[in-house]
Amino acid sequence: MSNAELEIKNKYNLVFQHYGLSHDVPSTVSSNKALRKILEDTKIRPYNLSVYGLRHTRASYLIHSGIPVDICAKVLGHTVLQFEKTYRHLLSEKRDAGFEAIRKL
């Protein structure tokens, strides 16, 4: 059933939320349990992915897709400084690739 069918509002666009508790953000543990069930039901492996891991995967995907750092930071709820500190290794790879592209011009 969909949120609309269950008459659940998702004002904050949460990926996981407690049914019937529209203002309550679920814990990491309950989110990971829900994610694991979804992965098992859909036969997507590995089953031990976590919401934390998915968040980092999303950030990596955004960076490698060429999305500007300020937009990546905003999407993930970081300041630009926090984002650059957390994902420094990926940003360094992109910077190095950019310099290499300039050298080839």
Image (cartoon, grey):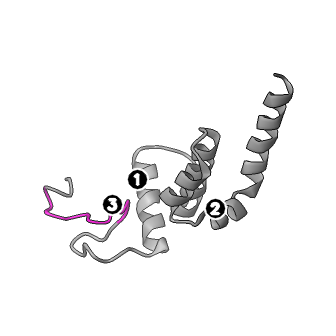
Residue 33 vs 103, above or below: the answer is: below
Hey, which quadrant is residue 67 in on the image? top right
Residue labelled with disc 3: 13
Q: CA distance from mark 2 to mark 1?
A: 29 Å
Residue type, mark 3 in image:
Asn
Magenta span: 5-16
- Can you tell which of label 2 and label 3 is closer to the viewer? 2
Near-viewer residue (44 or 84) = 84
Residue 89 position, x and y percent, is 77, 53
Q: Residue at x 69, y 60 (%)?
A: 84
Q: Secondary structure at mark 2?
A: helix
Q: Residue at x 84, y 32 (%)?
A: 100
In the rendered image, is residue 93 in sight? yes
Residue labelled with disc 1: 38
Residue type, mark 1 in image:
Ile
Near-viewer residue (89 or 48) = 89
Asked whether the beta carbons under mark 2 and mark 3 sit within 8 Å of each other, the answer is: no
For the stretch drawn in magenta, the main secondary structure is: loop
Q: Secondary structure at mark 1?
A: helix
Residue 48 position, x and y percent, is 57, 57
In the rendered image, is residue 47 in sight? no
Determine crowd level at label 3: few under 14, some 14-19, many 20+ residues with C-alpha closer than 10 A.
few
Apparent side of residue 63 relative to residue 102 in the rendered image (left or right):
left
Q: CA distance from mark 2 to mark 3?
A: 21 Å
Residue 72 vs 64, above or below: the answer is: below
Of labels 2 and 1, earlier in sequence is 1
Of labels 2 and 3, earlier in sequence is 3
Disc ID at residue 2: none
Q: Secondary structure at mark 3?
A: loop
**Residue 6 painted magenta:** yes
Disc ID at residue 83: 2
**Residue 17 painted magenta:** no
